Each structure stands twice: as structure tokens, then as C-alpha cells.
Image: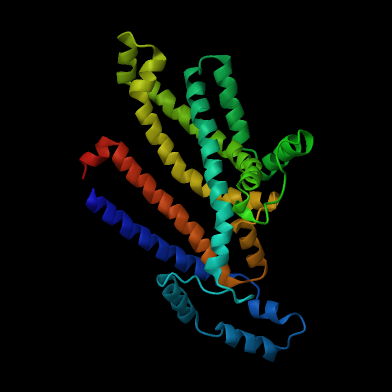
Amino acid sequence: MVRFLATRAVLLLLGLLVAAALIFAVLRVLPGDVAQVIGGTRASAEQVARIRAQLGLDQPLPVQFLDWIGGLLRLDLGRSLVTGTPVAGELGQKLEVTLPLAGLSLVLGLGLGIPLGVLSAVLHRRASGFVLAAAAQSVAAVPVVFAGVLLALLLGSFLHLLPVQGFPLDGWRQPGRAFASLILPALTIAVVEGAVVLRFTRSATLEALGQDHVRMAAAKGMTLHRALLTHGLPGVLLSVVSVIGLEIAALLVGAVIVEQLFQLPGVGRMLVTDVANRDLVKVQSELLVLTGLILVVGAVVDVLHRVLDPRQRERT
């Protein structure tokens, strides 16, 4: 197990390094010049060149990349090219919105998807099971923006149950209002992603129902539900753990869209603004942090698989 953890940690670091190189390279290909943005439309070529020199943008790309990586090794995400403020401080504030949003979305998505997926599989020979599966197939194809608009109209504008937009200025110093402002955005993501979890759970449960040890337990007198819970559920949970790794990436992408829709001051809105301003240092640091979160979740999922599945432990 120790060898596996060490190998996984090395792969995680290599993945972060490759991601950093790709993010840096892609951002340098994009059109636009942050020096021109800072100088304004009336800035002369000499003024723009002076700004580029002040920001270090006139240095060769390998030098810029190594400077950025050196800062990351010191846990320094750099400073904004536009405002000059440290990226880490502002990014930390935005993560106070994005991470709870993603976490709440994950909890709601799993809370909807897993029970309904198991129920859909158990009832797969009945009309109700078919309806659940068809509904999940349809909802999974719904764009997050469309789902958000529908839920905002229904739960916000029509029923007035939840706030539709905004986040308290004091943030989590007003925990009740802050949490309430995240429910509708989180539910928007959870409905779509929960439908995906439902489909995976249904497939895993149907496979478990067809396994010999589950059918043998039912043949010996256990009810089908008890046999599934006792002998089939561990295999279903392994499949769900795999889905969680994939869903985290979808949740973070969905958070970028939802934060724009519901006017939440999270990393998504920050990223969109910084891309428009061509603030390369902030954008590349934000993308790397989000990529790092996804890679860390993937590593945790691998470890959970090794812990939960005795067959994988026997290979080490």
C-alpha cells in the first residue's frame, strides 16, 4: 500500500507539471495583449512596450514559465498583471464560494442519483422503473444553463422559496444567507449530474442483480432487496466511487457556468473576468488550481478503490 501511495503521489506531481506546461502554452497562443489592455486604446507602441517590460512579458517564454513554476514551488501564485494584487489571496476568497457550491452539488447529486438509480434497477421490469430511467436519460442531456433558468423561475420567481441571485457581502459571516444563496445553484448542477449518477448506479445495480452470489442468496430465502443490500451493494458502491471522480470535473465546469447565471462571486466569475482582461498570471494560476483539485480527487478515488476492493489489494 505504501508503494502504491508513493507511486500515486509521483504521478500526481507529474500530472500537475504537465498541466502547468499545457496551460501556459495554450494561454500564450490566445489573441490579445494584457499590456495593451492596461495601456488603453490610446497607448502608443512605446508605452505598450514599456508596460510589457515592466511586467516581464518581454522575457523569453521559457524564462516566464520557469519563473512561474519557481513561484508555485514557493506556494506563490504570482500577482495580477492588471491590478498587481496577489493571486493567492483573491483566489482563496473565491474558493470560499466555489468549493462549498461544488461540495453541496456533489452531496445533492449523490443523494438523488444513488437511491433513485438503485430503485430504477430494482423496478426495471415495471413501468415506474422505465419512467425513472427515461427521465434520467432526458435530464442528463439538459444544459446546465437551461436547468438553472427553469429552477430559478420555478423555485425563485414563482414560488419565492429560494434567492435567485447574489451572495452576502459579508460572505460566510452570515452563514444562513450564504448557505441559502447556494442551494438553488447547487440544485441546478445536482439535478443534471444526479441524472448521470442515476444511470451509472442503475447499470451497476442491474449487473449486481445478475451476479451468481446475489441470485444464490435470494434462492436461499433472502428477499431480493436484502440480497442486493448485503451482497451486491459493495460492488455498486465501487462503481459509484469511479463516477465521483468523473463528476468532480463536471461539477467544477458546471460551477463556472452557474456562478455566472446566479451572480455568485466564485472562481468561475473570476476566471471569466480575467480571461477578458488577458490577465495571464491570474488565469493560469486559477486553471492550475482547478486542475489540481481534479487530479487530487482522482488520486483519492484511486486510493478508495484500493481500500474498498480486496482484489486490488491482493495485487500489491
The quarter of the picture where residue 143 lies is: top right
* Residue 226 percent location from the top left of the image: 38, 16
Residue positioned 51% across, 15% down in the render: 125
Frontmost residue, 171 versus 273: 171
Frontmost residue, 158 versus 307: 158
Scheme by which the image is coloured = rainbow
Residue positioned 66% across, 46% down in the render: 177
* Residue 124 percent location from the top left of the image: 50, 18
Q: Residue furthest bottom?
A: 46
* Residue 128 percent location from the top left of the image: 58, 17
Residue positioned 37% across, 35% down in the render: 238
* Residue 284 percent location from the top left of the image: 53, 67
Q: Is residue 66 left or right of residue 126?
A: left
The quarter of the picture where residue 184 lies is: top right
Q: Is residue 185 above or below residue 227?
A: below
Q: Is residue 188 left or right of residue 296?
A: right
Q: Residue furthest front?
A: 173
Residue 284 seen in the figure: no
